[in-house]
Image (cartoon, rainbow, N blue to C red):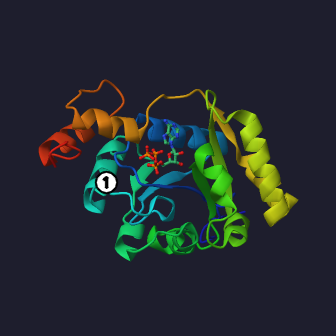
Amino acid sequence: MSTAGRIERPLRARRIGLFGGSFDPVHAGHLHAARAALRAHGLDRVVFVPAAEPPHKLGTRLADGRHRLAMLELATAGEPAFEASSLELDRGGRSYTIDTVRALPAAIGEPEDCEIYLILGTDNLAGLATWRDAAALIDRVQPVVIHREDESCGSQGEESALASMAQHLGPERADKVRRGRVVLPPVRVSATRLRGELARGASFGGELDPAVQQYIERHGLYRADA
Ligand code: ATP
């Protein structure tokens, strides 16, 4: 039978990773987490979205959003499945993930019913139930909690966060979060530590993409006297 003229339907829904954060600056740990999520869940693309004002870090002074976005663009340039989006910066104000999830498909040219995989570190798990419209958020996305093997909170801390989530949002939602979990060997790097070292003029091997490091130097970001 001829297939001429027939519209090909994709075999499965598109799978989009959404990785939000302050990315101040983006570092090897973030890329490592995104690669692990991509592999574990067979994602088609991962979109890194720097927050305008992260609700969980209100009052924290961040590098200008345009610099954080530019660094993400440099760090993701070599990986075809990765990209940076200015969605939250363009929206401005407090960056609530539920708003981003609702706007994401249209913003990146994906169908409204695409599957969204929300990538987050275990440090965000305990607070997830208190995020704006948390129940609707977990219903719309598949959370992907990145568990670093060396984390001090360990699996016990994670289990108690999930137990509390089950109480507040129901056991099905907690189970859904548990199912998306990805365990990966740690990359021991943190943006807070990097900013401290950059202020002291330290140089890096492997923790920052060389193009990101050059960008930081060129724009004098994170300097103690900035
Ligand atoms: P800061 O030290 O400024 O708080 P951060 O990297 O923890 O930096 P974000 O930029 O908001 O903060 O992080 C975005 C996401 O990346 C978070 O969900 C965080 O848990 C995760 N993440 C941060 N560092 C690592 C790492 N080394 N490995 C895996 N995931 C990480």
Quadrant of res 8:
bottom right
Q: Residue 167's spot in the image, x, y percent?
A: 84, 61
Q: Residue 35's spot in the image, x, y percent?
A: 52, 39
Residue sitting nearer the eye, 115 or 132: 132
Quadrant of res 122:
top right
Outermost residue, top side: 205
Look at the image and tell me in which quarter the N terminus lies. bottom right
> Residue placed at 56% from the left, 69% from the top?
101
Q: Is residue 82 left or right of residue 164?
A: left
106 is higher (above) or lower (below) than 216:
below
* Residue 1, visible in the rendered structure: yes
Total tally of numbered discs in the picture = 1
Q: Residue 21's spot in the image, x, y percent?
A: 46, 54
> Residue placed at 55% from the left, 66% from the top?
97
Q: How busy is the neighbourhood of tag 1: few (under 14 within 10 Å), some, or many (20 plus)?
A: many
Q: Residue 206's spot in the image, x, y percent?
A: 35, 26
> Residue placed at 39% from the left, 50% from the top?
23
Q: Is residue 67 left or right of residue 97?
A: left
SS of the residue under disc 1: helix
Residue sitting nearer the eye, 97 or 158: 158
> Residue placed at 20% from the left, 44% from the top?
215
Type of amino acid under label 1: Arg
133 is higher (above) or lower (below) than 11:
below
* Residue 178, visible in the rendered structure: no
Q: Is residue 28 left or right of residue 146?
A: left
Q: To which residue does mark 1 refer?
A: 68
